[in-house]
Image (spheres, rainbow, N blue to C red):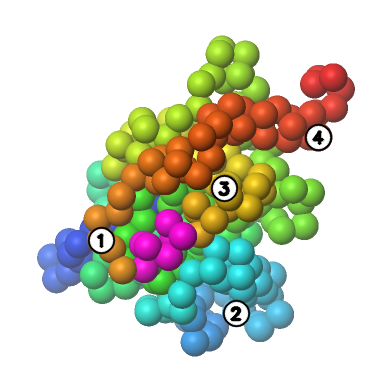
Amino acid sequence: MRWSATGLLLIALVVHAGCQTTPRTTFSLERPDRHSFATEHFEILSDVRLESNAPTVQALQSLREDLISVLQIPEQRDPVKVYLFSDEVSYRYYMQATWRDLPPRRAYFVGTSRELAVYSFISPHVLEDLRHEFTHGILHASLQSVPLWLDEGVAEYFEVDAGVAERVSETHLQELSTALAEGWSPGLYRLELISDFRDLTQRDYAESWAWVHFMLNSTPEAKEVLLSYLQGLKTTKTPWRLQERLEKAVPSYSDDLRRHVEQLLRGAFPQDNQ
Ligand SMILES: [Zn+2]
């Protein structure tokens, strides 16, 4: 689901500045701007009115607090802009016209040297999509670099509503159940080599989610590996591999992750996992 729903694009330069011609159509190359709701840390721009108690505003505010308290990441350097289109057709028209090569996805985080921007539209999935993309935004607003697998693993983790028991993603657990049946041997080596989000498969998203879930919720040693890694990303643009640190601190990490997933599966689908 998530695998085909959202995307992450980081580009060093704004590639379309000054070279667009606006076609005469019903749709627009303009981003939503009729209404805005701004805090010190983010701004939502939309063509529909947003009050401070709107679910989207509340969701972003509480997610930001959650990210800072769970991940202990530093204060944001930059605000995150959220462009919330009022309908899917306008969103797709704008995205396709602006970034022609991007695969169509329900939401995008686009990080450029000019701004950190989330794009999506009002739909039944809007809160989940915004939680995912806004997590990317906060990570990139606070850290110097974020390896792709970790970016997606953390975004997948925090897109699940905080009220869901153990913050499990049933979609990812189902994927990992299949992986386990196929003799899955978890390791970060391969994931840490992937640098383009278009190369990530559904299983890669599920594994990235599982590593983050495992490190945040298994043992203090595993959690410390993730938190100190994130601290290191505050200042480095060329991160080391997390697997080496994890291997040192938790030598049985591969078996431990498998057991962690099996335990989550028993909790989520007790009838299938006796
Ligand atoms: Zn993502």
| Mark number displayed over residue 222 | 3
| Most common SS among magenta residues | helix
Residue, disc 4? 267
Give the residue type at disc 2. Answer: Arg
Is 256 in the magenta?
no
Is 231 in the magenta?
yes
Residue, x 70% and y 28% (percent of image)?
A: 262
Q: Is mark 2 within 8 Å of ligand 1?
A: no
Kindly indicate whether the residue at mark 1 contacts the one at mark 2 (C-beta within 8 angstroms). Answer: no
Residue, x 43% and y 52% (percent of image)?
A: 151
Residue, disc 1? 237
Vertically, is 143 above or below 43?
above
Kindly indicate whether the residue at mark 4 contacts the one at mark 2 (C-beta within 8 angstroms). Answer: no
**Residue 41: image location, x then y, percent:** 49, 81
Residue, disc 2? 49
Question: On the image, which quarter does residue 14 sit in?
Answer: bottom left
Q: What stretch is highlighted in magenta?
A: 228-234
Question: On the image, which quarter does residue 233 sit in?
Answer: bottom left
Give how far apart the Cα atoms at labels 2 and 1 are.
Answer: 39 Å
Q: Residues within 10 Å of mark 4 (few under 14, many from 20)?
A: some
Secondary structure at badge 1 equals loop
> Mark 2 vs mark 3: which is more N-terminal?
2
Give the residue type at disc 3. Answer: Ala
